[in-house]
Amino acid sequence: MSRASGLRAASSKAVAASVQKSQPPNFAMRTGIVISIESPSTLTVDISGSTIPNMPYLSSYSPLPGDNVQILKMDNTWIVIGSVGMATHHAMFGEAGEVNIAAFGATTVFTQTVPFAFPFSIRPVVMVNIDSAATETNLFWAKAATITTIDFSLRLTCATATAFTATRTIQWLAIEQG
């Protein structure tokens, strides 16, 4: 091997070692979903099913619950650097669930407050459905009423004043208007 090629090999190794030393330790990038805004400078974010509270974010980012965000980690410090995917003002947030009503007394209207797991930034549209596998569904109808950003009232109305002991399952879907 010539002296010139030996110097080039040594120089390449030195440059590679220098570049490796300049990389920040424990550098990582993750994608998460904003669960809630805790303060003007911190969020609660879900990263792969783990909830992380009090996560700071860049002042140039205007967060909304449901935003997909990019999160930068350097050493033990995490920071949300901004939203990814659809623009923040077009992001949609939704939630679904079901309510099981175990007994329905001799009344024609049953009302129950249904809380959302995560607050919406604006009042959502809520749709309800009586599980068609339940018996005598033609005697019932369901309605979402008094809808707020944190909950709604589920009203189950019966055509008769007869007591029912069978469980009624009501499915619901809430979607933020975007």
Image (cartoon, rainbow, N blue to C red):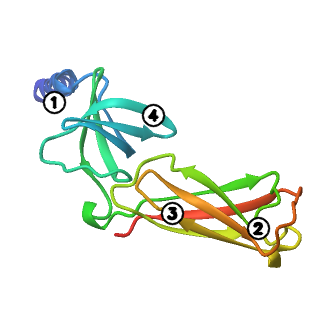
**From what the image shows, is residue 66 above or below residue 32?**
below
Q: Return the residue at label 1.
A: 5
Question: Sequence order check: which comes first, mark 1 or mark 4?
Answer: 1
Query: From where the camera sits, is residue 6 visible?
Result: no
Q: Is residue 33 above or below residue 146?
A: above
Q: Nearer the viewer, residue 83 or 135?
A: 135
Q: SS at mark 2?
A: loop
Residue 2 x/y as whole percent: 15, 27
User: Residue 51 bears which disc, if any?
Assistant: 4
Question: What amino acid does circle 1 point to?
Answer: Ser
Q: Nearer the viewer, mark 1 or mark 4?
A: 4
Observer-nearest residue: 120 or 30?
Answer: 120
Q: Is residue 140 above or below residue 163?
A: below
Q: Is residue 117 left or right of residue 69?
A: right
Residue 175, position as x, y percentages in the image: 46, 65
Residue 160 in view, yes or no: yes
Determine which residue is flagged by label 3: 174
Q: CA distance from mark 3 to mark 1?
A: 68 Å
- Asked which secondary structure carries label 3, the reply is strand
The residue carrying pointer 3 sits among few (fewer than 14), some (14 to 19) or many (20 or more) residues within 10 Å by Cα, namely: many
SS category of the residue bearing label 4: strand
User: In whole angstroms, how far apart are the C-alphas of marks 1 and 4?
Assistant: 54 Å
| Residue 52 occupies quadrant | top left
How packed mark 1 is, by other alpha carbons closer than 10 Å (few <14, some 14-19, many 20 or more), is few
